[in-house]
Amino acid sequence: MSISVPSDSRKFRVAIMPGFVFIVSFSLPLLFCCVLIQDGLDFGRSALGFASVWVVVLSFVGSCMASYLFPDAISPEGVYGHGFWGQRQFVRWEDITAVRPLRILSLRWLRVYSRTDNKTTWLGLSHSRAIEYYQEIKRLAPSDSPILNYLK
């Protein structure tokens, strides 16, 4: 069953550029390795350039899609994020037991652990409206919430 975000929640989308940098930094080296494995050092430079342009374009499209398909939401009841595989998850403010930061290249996340289930909810921190996102969490989170320790 899919979890829907209530209308009184504020949605925040991850910024496109950090996702783009993340995807490109993995995709281009992978493309170059595949070309070297397949053709060795005798490869067509124009074909590699053409493929590189497509990797950049598709990385931008993928980053835009991720930004629009996987928004986080903050509500008076708790936070709506996503699991590792993209499924939407909800954690109530009272149920947050631990928060751990994670940074991979240009992307920053908070991994939020809940006491009611063994699921980890991921909240992106590279939002296009980061200041509003942090203010909304600070406004709605209880004063003893572990999530407040990791906000700017």
Image: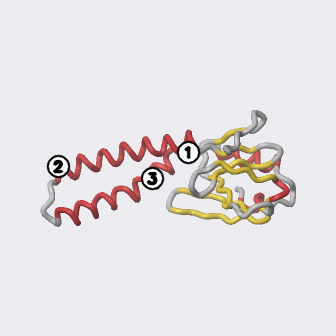
The alpha-carbon separation of the residues under discs 1 and 2 comes to 32 Å
Find residue 27 and report its image quarter.
bottom left
Q: Is residue 146 visible?
A: no
Q: Nearer the viewer, residue 85 or 104?
A: 85
Q: Nearer the viewer, residue 145 or 77?
A: 77
Residue 124 percent coordinates (x, y): 62, 52
Q: Which residue: 67% across, 61% down?
A: 111
Q: Nearer the viewer, residue 91 or 138?
A: 91
Q: Which residue: 36% across, 43% down?
A: 57
Furthest residue to the left? 42
Q: Which residue: 69% across, 51% down?
A: 89
Q: In terms of sequence position, does the residue under pointer 1 or pointer 3 come before the other?
A: 1
Q: In terms of sequence position, does the residue under pointer 1 or pointer 2 come before the other?
A: 1
Q: Amino acid at mark 3?
A: Val
Query: Is 143 displayed left or right of 10 in the figure?
Result: right
Residue hosting label 3: 21
Residue 85 percent coordinates (x, y): 57, 55
Q: Which residue: 17% across, 53% down?
A: 45
Residue 142 percent coordinates (x, y): 86, 54
Find residue 30 and report its image quarter.
bottom left
Find residue 74 and report its image quarter.
top right
Furthest residue to the top? 7
Residue 137 percent coordinates (x, y): 76, 49
Residue hosting label 2: 46
Label 2 Cα neighbours within 10 Å, binned few <14 / some 14-19 / many ≥20: few
Residue hosting label 1: 15
Circle 2 sits in a helix, a strand or a loop, which is it? helix
The alpha-carbon separation of the residues under discs 1 and 3 comes to 11 Å
Query: Is 39 displayed left or right of 135 in the figure?
Result: left
